[in-house]
Amino acid sequence: MYSPGSIANLGPGFDVFGIALEGVGDIVLLKEQSEPGVKINVQGVGADRIPNDPSKNSSGAILEHIIKKHRLEHGFEVDVRKGIPPGKGMGSSGASASATAVAVNEMLGLRLSKEKIVELAAIGEGAVAGAPHADNVGASILGGFVMIGENWEFIQMDAPRFGIVVAVPDIYIENKTRVARELLPEKVLLKDAIRNINHASRMAVAIAQRDAVMFGKNINDLVIEPYRATMIPCFWDVKQAALDAGAYGSSISGGGPSVFAVGENVYEIGDAMKEAFKDIDVQLYYTQPSNRGARVI
Ligand code: HSE
């Protein structure tokens, strides 16, 4: 089962917006095993950073949940081939969780609704992030642009084509998503909330109207970005460099520390972002929205 990576939040849509990415994803091979429990084998990009303990692994947590819920006597073995670098904000744990949730639904013939598959995948994401959320997994499962509701009910829209650059800095933050969530304030200013609602609404309309420029120009977040910027060296310079190079918009990719930008001249934008990270090594991903979600390959 293949599942694409994703960018969550997309600026003002914290825990609500996600978009699936073309050309970067994880592959999960799920097998039944006669012994109970879950065995996890991970290969590929950043495999050494992925916990094999099922309760701390986004695939493992899902399978343990299923074993308990359905009182299964058998266990599972899962091979995860990582194409998405973990801990960088490109929906890495979410993609593995998504592929696993879709695969186990198929394998056991559970006939779960799409909402329930999203909910199941969010359990896996929760094991890694400390709090379940479904913006990444929603995008990975469904493809395109998603908006996740409070009870995992979603709106999915196919996205128009536009260029996306993700600048992935070579910095490692232990338990990154947990840390990134702990940085956030409990209260926000009304004027900031109003501006975020305005921008987020326009982004959703932009997708529906297939207007990439309006989408990109509304990537503005006053609620989350200022707090998380503190954990990303050079963040404000990188964002400004992307905008100066012609990006329509730029913000933190998911929980960071990667920074994404939306625009047309992606190679110039990418070069500018890389330079603004100064001494930090940066890997650039040039991608676009993928309107196809998790699928058998
Ligand atoms: N919405 C999530 C967050 C995405 O920003 O914490 C990262 O998992």
Image: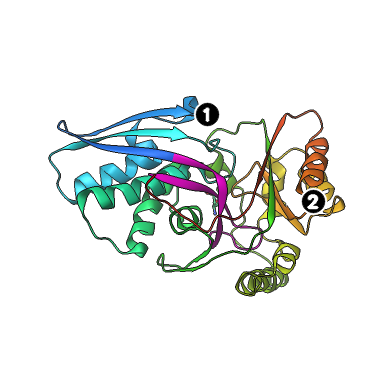
Between 200 and 227, the residue placed more toward the observer is 200
To which residue does mark 2 refer? Answer: 265
Q: Residues within 10 Å of mark 1 (few under 14, many from 20)?
A: some
Query: Would residue 127 appear left or right of 215 to someone viewing this image?
Result: left
Q: Residue at x 75, y 37 (%)?
A: 233
* Three-letter amino acid code at the position of disc 1: Gly
Q: Residue at x 75, y 58 (%)?
A: 249
Q: Residue at x 20, y 50 (%)?
A: 108
| Residue 196, x across and y down, in percent | 68, 68
Mark 2 secondary-structure assignment: loop
Between 105 and 181, the residue placed more toward the observer is 105
Between 12 and 2, the residue placed more toward the observer is 2
- Indicate which disc residue 46 carries: 1
Mark 1 secondary-structure assignment: loop
Above or below 154: residue 51: above
- Magenta region, residue range: 1-26
| Residue 236, x across and y down, in percent | 80, 47
Q: Most prominent secondary structure in the magenta stretch?
A: strand
Q: Is residue 128 magenta?
A: no
| Residue 263, x across and y down, in percent | 75, 55
